[in-house]
Amino acid sequence: MAAWVKGGAVDVSAAVEAAATLLATAKTPIVTGLSADTSAVRAAYHLAGLIGASVDPAGGAGLYAELGPLSQFGNLNTTPAEAIGRADAVLVVGLRPWDRPIVQEIASSAPVRGRAAGSERTLLSLGGPGNGATRHVAYPADTGGLAVSVAHLRAYVKGNLSGEAAFADLARRLTTAQYGVVLYDAAELGELGVEMLQGLVRDLNDLTRFFALSISDGFQGRAVTQLASWTTGQPPRVGFGRDLPEHDPWRFDSARQVAAGEVDAALWLAAIPAPRPDWLGSLPTIAIVGEGSPEATGDVADIVIAVGVPGETAGGALWNERRAAITYSPPVGQPADLTAAGVLAAIQDRLTQKKGVSC
């Protein structure tokens, strides 16, 4: 494994010492990213509790776009297996879901269970790209965006609007499905859009069986949400500045905190590659990244430690989108010497010695 401090290559113990020193002197640090296996995420929460940091996952925008409507109105969701096995009509909303394997699996199969078994599957697109190779019917989004398009469609389903051929046809296809699914990316749709989409699904269930299926963010956000719940009793964005975890999705949005000058140090955890924050490098930062990733260089942050990638060069419990659950992924071949959880534990041990406290 490789490690760097101020751009110079060092051994891991020196990088751990430098990281502990940086965090020990920080007054308002943040722990962000959390794109890693559950052991590493758990270690990150424990470290944040020790140093009074706030926590924010890389997929926070998408997670909170779903959590807001869920907390107020509930939802009607299904699983990938149920969508593939039962749905005779699948509406894909937006652009992002088309890059995910589940869309190709849905497009290349037909329902085999339930009342739609043996039926032809219709794949529909609202606001997706114009490639007809994998779509049966594509409908353009409104100029107002995806959320407005979903609201427009909902009005047609409810019978509150009529006359526009495209939306009327799409509404007819949805209301006549035997088992329908709406597939979407919460971060692309936004909180108001997710709220409207869940309302659309509720309206469709007055006429037939219909469910929503949100694709995961790819940065372990679903696993982080579950781990945060059993660790703090709250959703992921929490702050430990007053010893006990306080949940506030606005206060503990890491991008907002950095822009407002509220933090003086950061730990970015991305053992599984995740988009690099725009602010990375604008304040003293520790980066724990996957070996072989573009970020595994000395110029990404003040302190960089490369570790095994969960599911590749390290084992770990990860979110399995196909199963909609956390499952264990073994390493492929010889496992790496370092794991993110091990590095975080070493930093915490060194901090404990420096602070003279027990964790």
Image: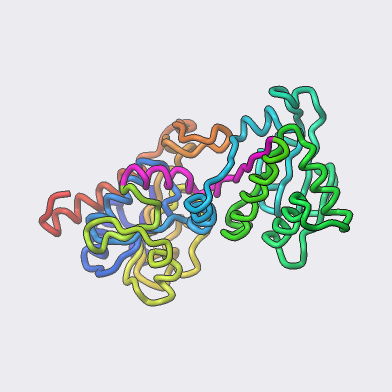
Q: Nearer the viewer, residue 237 or 305?
A: 237
Q: Tell me if residue 53 comes above or below residue 314 in the rendering.
A: below
State left or right for residue 299 relative to residue 155: left
The way the protein has been coloured in the rendering is: rainbow
**Residue 202 visible at all:** yes
Residue drawn 68% across the image and 38% down it = 210
Magenta segment: does it hold 319? no
Q: Nearer the viewer, residue 329 or 42?
A: 42
Residue drawn 73% across the image and 27% down it = 111
Q: Tell me if residue 258 comes above or below residue 356 in the rendering.
A: below
Residue drawn 84% across the image and 51% down it = 168
Residue drawn 23% across the image and 52% down it = 348
Q: How many marks?
A: 0
Magenta segment: does it hold 212? yes
**Residue 4 visible at all:** no
Quadrant assignment, res 284:
bottom left
Quadrant assignment, res 81:
top right
Q: Position of residue 54 (x, y in %)?
A: 33, 61
- Residue stretch rendered in magenta on the structure: 209-231
Q: Position of residue 220 (x, y in %)?
A: 48, 46
Name the residue furthest left: 356
State left or right for residue 349 relative to residue 12: left
Q: Tell me if residue 53 comes above or below residue 318 in the rendering.
A: below
Q: Position of residue 330 (x, y in %)?
A: 45, 31
Quadrant assignment, res 87:
top right
Q: Position of residue 328 (x, y in %)?
A: 44, 31
State left or right for residue 324 relative to residue 135: left
